[in-house]
Amino acid sequence: MAVVSVSMPDELLARLDQFAEEHGYTGRSEVVREASRNLLGEFEDTRLEERDLMGIVTVLFDYETTSVEERMMHLRHEHEHLVASNFHSHVGDHYCMELFVLEGELEDISAFVGKIRATKDALTVDYSVIPVDSFDPLAQG
């Protein structure tokens, strides 16, 4: 097995170690391997491929970190074919929330979420995806 060196803030490393201990992992490498498999598999659901999807992406960041807000603006314009709506809100005394409503295919939504996750200083990125090409609210099932 290859050895990989990863840089991360001390606080995140401490949380990773605590998580490993509390959940019975043999160490941080096992946690990172599982997290990597989960991250890579998130958008590999073949049931969603080549379907019309709606995605909701929520980003939380410190309001003093203007670089995140600027990055969100650039991504919104760069992907305006995908972004159906965008909402910005203040949360508490120190945070902002950016919400994106996306309409498109899995590959495009996945790329958009990946770019947001790669944004330095974004505190959390959460998303959900649902198919809308055969949405029938009256269907029994």
Image (tube, rainbow, N blue to C red):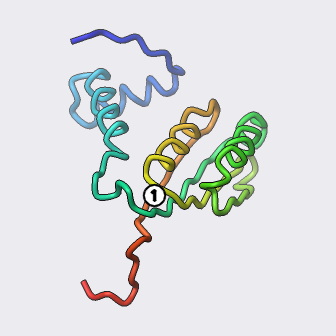
Amino acid under disc 1: Ser
Q: Quadrant of residue 137?
A: bottom left
Q: Is residue 112 above or below residue 9?
A: below
- Residue in view at x 46 percent, y 62 percent: 53
Q: Quadrant of the N terminus?
A: top left
- Residue in view at x 50 percent, y 63 percent: 54
- Residue in view at x 58 percent, y 53 percent: 58
Q: Quadrant of residue 15?
A: top left
Q: Is residue 49 left or right of residue 116?
A: left
Q: Position of residue 39 (x, y in %)?
A: 37, 38
- Residue in view at x 76 percent, y 43 percent: 63
Q: Position of residue 40 (x, y in %)?
A: 35, 36
Judged from this view, the residue extending furthest toward the front is: 50
Q: Is residue 11 above or below residue 76?
A: above
Q: Is residue 47 above or below residue 120?
A: below
Residue situated in front as seen by the camera: 137 or 21: 137
Q: Is residue 82 left or right of residue 20?
A: right
Q: Quadrant of the C terminus?
A: bottom left
Q: Position of residue 76 (x, y in %)?
A: 69, 49
Residue situated in front as seen by the camera: 96 or 113: 113
Residue situated in front as seen by the camera: 103 or 6: 103
Q: Is residue 21 above or below residue 132?
A: above
Report helix, strand or loop for mark 1. strand
Q: Is residue 26 left or right of residue 134?
A: left
Determine which residue is flagged by label 1: 128
Residue situated in front as seen by the camera: 123 or 117: 117
Q: Position of residue 119 (x, y in %)?
A: 61, 33
Q: Quadrant of residue 130?
A: bottom left
- Local crowd size for mark 1, using a 10 Å CA cut-off: few (<14), some (14–19), many (≥20): few
